Image (cartoon, rainbow, N blue to C red):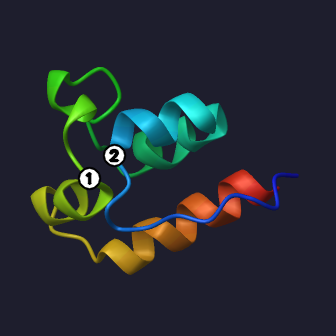
């Protein structure tokens, strides 16, 4: 369990995936192509959520749940 798993809309997708590998499942379950996308090094969670027409708060909640165990 990672108590430090707190996410911000400004977090970069690649950084999230690098620090919390278990976050990969969140992107896959939502059919987001972020993992492996060249833009993941620059794209924030807010931008990724917007690109997939989802609320960033929902994405962040899912990431926190997955990464906190």
Q: Which residue is mark 2?
A: 12
- Quick check: 48 left or right of 2? left
Tag of residue 44:
1
Q: Residue at x 77, y 59 (%)?
A: 68
Tell me the crowding category of disc 1: few under 14, some 14 to 19, or many 20 or more residues within 10 angstroms, Cα based.
many
Residue 26 screen position, x and y as percent: 51, 49
The residue closer to the viewer here, 8 or 57, is 8
Classify 18 as above or below 43: above
Q: Quadrant of residue 32?
A: top left
Q: Quadrant of residue 19?
A: top right
Residue 59 screen position, x and y as percent: 42, 66
Dot 2 falls on a residue whose secondary structure is loop
Q: CA distance from mark 1 to mark 2?
A: 4 Å
Q: Residue at x 26, y 30 (%)?
A: 41
Dot 1 falls on a residue whose secondary structure is loop
The residue closer to the viewer here, 16 or 31, is 16
């Amino acid at each position: 369990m990672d108590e430090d798993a707190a996410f911000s809309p400004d977090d970069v997708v690649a950084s999230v995936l690098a620090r919390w590998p278990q976050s990969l499942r969140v992107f896959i379950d939502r059919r987001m192509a972020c993992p492996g996308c060249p833009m993941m090094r620059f794209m924030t969670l807010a931008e990724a959520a917007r690109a997939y027409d989802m609320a960033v708060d929902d994405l962040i909640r899912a990431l926190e749940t997955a990464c906190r165990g």
